[in-house]
Amino acid sequence: MFKLSDSAIKSFDANGYLIVDSLLDTSKIPALHQAYDELFDGQFETGVKPDEVNWQFKDGDPSLTRQICNGWKSNRTIARIILDEDIGQAIGQLTGWTGVRVMIDNLIWKPKGAKSLGYHQDSAYLDWYTPNDLVTCWIALDETTAEGGTVEFIQGSHKWTESSPEGEFHAPKDYRLPMKNAAKANGITPVIDYVEVPAGGGSFHHGWTWHGSGKNSGKNHRRALVLHAMRADVEYNPEKLEQGIGPIYSRYKRLADNQIDENFFPIIWSKDGYRTPQLTQFLAG
Ligand SMILES: O=C(O)CCC(=O)C(=O)O
């Protein structure tokens, strides 16, 4: 069982992130690498296509960081990590939420030489639900270094003003520019912290923490599996629906009400022991 100490929780509150050397049993990593090979090759074990496929071997730009969102729906090896109760419990401990739900996952693959991902605050993009709290668990599937383009966080930036979406996510000219603009607006000199961990280590970060990652100038692949989690008691935000929430997550909106369906946004941990019941059957295949 994955447990966080009181000082780890305090550090998350103060900095807006927490770096952890071990999140995942490393014996699981070769199968996860294999799952990445299959998903980026268009092989979907469950027959379901991920919600966002931004890169494939057959036609992907080799200079870009590869990305797929909601790979858990397509591959059970990925799903076993994304739907893991212990990770949900750790997020519950960090936030005090009584239940934790999957918002989306993100499969990131930055091979040697691949370009940066622009700095952003996740909650500026993922805001179609209410209450709009978000926490992310980022799991390294390779050893990570600053030179190798690991994810980087700005200390205390979850307390800065909330930004609006700005600039390119994939390969912007200056990947730190939106953060530098925000730091200036907040009158703060940013302090960068790099997630340098062994494979299987990683981090948790707050939805408003500024983060991004540079070019992979190292020698190795840099793969990461990311869970963006929300509270179990969220609903679609009627105000955001009026503005339009885009073609992907509006797909799962029920006609009758604003409830968020557990089939697509499962509850992975609750203080009272509840988990979306069908997950056991789904994971068994
Ligand atoms: O892996 C990366 O470089 C960026 C990941 C990210 O943006 C996130 O975890 O929210």
Image (cartoon, helix red, strand yellow):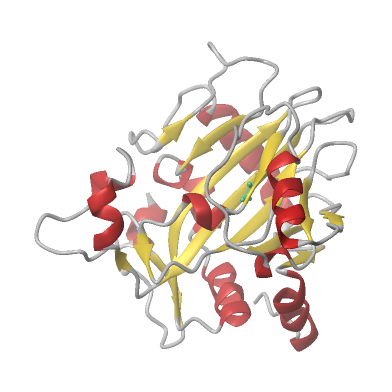
Which residue is nearer to you in this view: 111 or 1? 111
Which quadrant, please, contains the N terminus? bottom right
Corner quadrant of residue 264: bottom left
Position of 172 relative to 18 (above/below): above
Q: Is residue 254 visible?
A: yes
- Pick the residue in front: 241 or 268: 241
Residue 240 lies left or right of residue 50; in this view the side is left
> Residue sitting at 46 percent across and 53 percent down?
126
In screen coordinates, is 195 left or right of 285? Answer: right
> Which residue appears farthest toward the top when viewing the image?
59
| Residue 254 x, y percent position in the rendering | 16, 56
Is residue 242 or residue 29 the one in the foreground? 242
Report x, y in % for residue 180: 76, 47
Which of 154 and 267 lies nearest the eye of the viewer?
154
User: Eyeballing the image, is 111 above or below 252?
Assistant: above
- The structure residue drawn at horizontal position 68% and vertical position 36%, both measured from the top left corner, is 117
Residue at 72%, 52% (x, y): give it. 27
Residue 261 in sight: no
Tell me residue 224's x, y (percent): 67, 44
* Relative image position of residue 130 (x, y in whole percent): 36, 68
Please state the total of marks drawn on the protein image.
0
Identify the residue at horizontal 37%, vertical 79% (top origin): 274
